[in-house]
Amino acid sequence: MAHAHSVKRHKGLMDWLTTVDHKKIAILYLLAGGLFFGIGGIEAVLIRLQLIKPMNDFVSAQTFNELITMHGTTMIFLGVMPVIFALMNAVIPLQIGARDVAFPFLNSLGFWTFLFGGILLNLSWIMGGAPDAGWTAYTPLSTTTYSTTHGVDFYTVGLQIAGLGTLIGGINFLATIITMRAPGMSFMRMPMFTWTSFITSAMILFAFPAITVGLVLLSFDRILGANFFEVANGGNPVLWQHIFWIFGHPEVYILILPAFGVISEVIPTFARKRLFGYSSMVFATILIAFLGFMVWAHHMFTTGLGPVANALFSIATMLIAVPTGIKIFNWLFTMWGGQIRFTSPNLFAIGFIPTFVMGGVTGVMLASAPADFQFHDTYFVVAHFHYVIVGGLVSGLLSGLHYWWPKMFGRMLNESLGKLSFWFFIIGFHLTFFVQHFLGLMGMQRRVFTYLPNQGFDTLNMVSTIGAILMGIGILIFLINAIVTATKPKGVADDPWEDGRTLEWAIPSPPPEYNFKQIPLVRGIDALWKEKMAGNKGMTPAEPLGPIHMPSPTILPFVMSVGIFIAGLGFMFSKEQFSNSFMSLIFNNWIVVIIGLLITFGSMLLRSLYDDHGWHIEVDELDEEGVKA
Amino acid sequence: MSTTHAETVDGALPHEPEKATLEGRNKVLSFWLFLGGEAVLFGTLFATFLALRNQTNEGPTAGELFQLPMTAAATLILLVSSLTSVFAVQAMHRHKVAALRVWLMITVLLGLGFLGLEIYEFAEYVRAEKFGMTTSAFSSAFYTLVGFHGAHVAFGVLWISVLIGQLYKKGLTVVTAPKVYVSAMYWHFIDVVWVFIFTVVYLLGKVG
């Protein structure tokens, strides 16, 4: 039946640029995150190729510094963060029985600011040199005295813009989870992935403003000649370390908690048992988040804070092992006595557990301040954080992607390729990083661009590089799997794993743009499983069939992000000496910055002046689509 | 999902029109969350300032620079503007659009007065005292903290001005009411931050 929409429907590229649908934004996050993850991965392989043998000259020392800096920065901020946001966007509104997030417009804005921040950061490769002061950008190394290119400016401005997008996303998901849950879904009935994403969003809210300030201070030092970190003029370089890690330590829990959530979804599904100790999982998550804010100075044991501070931060850090241990045992007890199916998502989830435990054990070792004086800035630390971030987080994300892929795209990933990619990934991972523990204990420093022969480093570095290549092959197989799957026809069942427990498996794959024709009534934890066990076909609706209100697509978030991007570039080059007089005119007089800000604030004004009334999908259209499905 | 269709004052506008729709409630809740993030932002700036406030690099010190009478006047202006924004929200709850607009205009004028004093203060420091961004770590921290606050005030002035215009054009509806309400929350927040700046930067600078 024909129906006149009051809103213009876009097609093709314009559809993607203007979409406010959380499911499409999830795919955008996945594509952009995947792209940056690929760039960061190539950087990783280049680093390992340089270190494959002693006294190698594959890349120069300067290039090596740029590679390690960009590898860390890209992977953390532009690789895994957006993939986390991809899963959150794809899954959370479905898991809580909502039709969209609380602020679809802001959701789109968050994505575009992240993307333009990431692009700006990576432009550094072709615009005079990438940042080279490490992903932590410690002062004074990152000040203009020691880092003379624009590299660190790309770092401060690019991360500032990308961080803005993350903060917007965090607030959006907090509001979504607080106010948009379906009737009956109390907080203690929420799926664990929703819980961990909720806590992660809260951590984003309280951690990211700290790095915002840190980056402002560093860019003011570098561009406006301020003295925050200039010792000669009264500044204090340790201040940067504090601000960076007050953000940076919560950040690693921001990263890992959603992976905990994924594991807590995948393991019960494929064990056909409800999650063991759900309430203790919730409280362990909250406790980890709380303690995560209390331990930042364990990155600074060797800075010289004194024995009292070091002891306190040591103990606080070790305490985190308790809630984390609760989680590990809960996952094991969930599997205990279950009917386990070793599907590809479950393989990644089961591989996660021992790998993450190993990263946790080295974490407790590092938490011991006296021992840390030995471990500090060696490959032992590199091994530790790659165990938690790659073996932990990336495994978790791959598990989640395999698990929710049919829900996101309507097609199952190939199981054989999935399992092959898992084995390459996990074997390659352990080959790469297990030996690095011993390299570190034998005294190999991190961030050195080469090393002398015959110190016992040669073989282990060779092994590590071979492992990195295997891991790269694992990721490539996943990529091939995704491409092969994209050519297959859509049409998987609503619940393709057959043992789905939560609400997202009660609706078609991929879901229609309004998600739920009728908002479901939630009658317990694992809402869909409960209905299945009661012998019901699907969920009981909580509302009569009626017209559904939808937000209008809009290009404004894209334009606003372009404006911020222009302003950022203008600010970076405001003190640059140009040979071209026109360039000096527009940059040195802040004209570029003003144009960029005008674009952004002008778009905000337009958004405020013209109300978005949205549009409705009428009941007859719902019925029509219902027949098709 | 509730609709955002505008209702006029003549229709049945509820007592708290800012919380009448899900969109409105989401906006208010998220703005509280946003202010939580802003608190961390200013907290970090305050911490930076406290760490560096005695690092004057042989430039002017806080005791030499600050003139408490002028800062006290700025404080009084900003505190009164917070009161007028309360009156604005009260007028909104009574559905008196004209009074609402007048109180918002007074708030904007007071905000402009505050900004004028701050710009004068900064200009004097730079001109008469040779106290600029690059003078010392203290000066950098001072201008960044107080300047961030000033930029927030400037943004608030622009924002509330736009809202006054919208109230003329669209009237008080369940769409415009949440905007007015969160702008008032924002205004109170920057007022509270100023109270801390007055204490930590100016009073402590004079006596500490």
Image (cartoon, coloured by chain):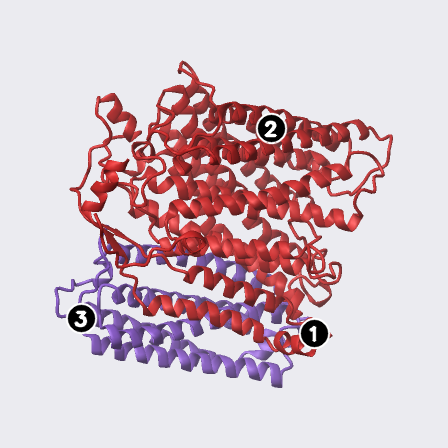
Residue B191 position within the rendered picture, expressed as x and y whole percent measured from the top left: 39, 69
Nearer to us: label 2 or label 1: 2
Nearer to us: label 2 or label 3: 2
Label 3 – label 1 distance at C-alpha: 57 Å
Callout 3 touching callout 1 (CB < 8 Å):
no
Residue sticking out furthest to the top: A337
Residue A261 position within the rendered picture, expressed as x and y whole percent measured from the top left: 43, 34
What amino acid is at disc 1? Glu
Q: Residues within 10 Å of mark 3 (few under 14, many from 20)?
A: many
Label 2 – label 1 distance at C-alpha: 58 Å
Query: From the viewer's perspective, is residue A229 above or below residue B107?
Result: above
What amino acid is at disc 2? Phe
Quadrant (top left, top right, bottom left, bottom right) of the C terminus of chain A: top left
**Viewer-nearest residue: A470 or A327:** A470
Q: Is residue A179 visible?
A: yes
**Viewer-nearest residue: A322 or A628:** A628
Q: Which residue is mark 3?
A: B95
Q: Which chain is purple?
A: B
Label 2 – label 3 distance at C-alpha: 63 Å
Q: Which residue is mark 1?
A: B58
**Viewer-nearest residue: B19 or A493:** A493
Residue A555 position within the rendered picture, expressed as x and y whole percent measured from the top left: 41, 60
Residue B110 position within the rendered picture, expressed as x and y whole percent measured from the top left: 37, 80
Q: Which residue is mark 2?
A: A425
Tell me if A536 is positioned left or right of A43 in this view.
Answer: left
Query: From the viewer's perspective, is residue A497 above or below residue B149?
Result: above
Q: Quadrant of residue B158?
A: bottom left
The picture's colour for chain A is red
Q: Residues within 10 Å of mark 1 (few under 14, many from 20)?
A: few
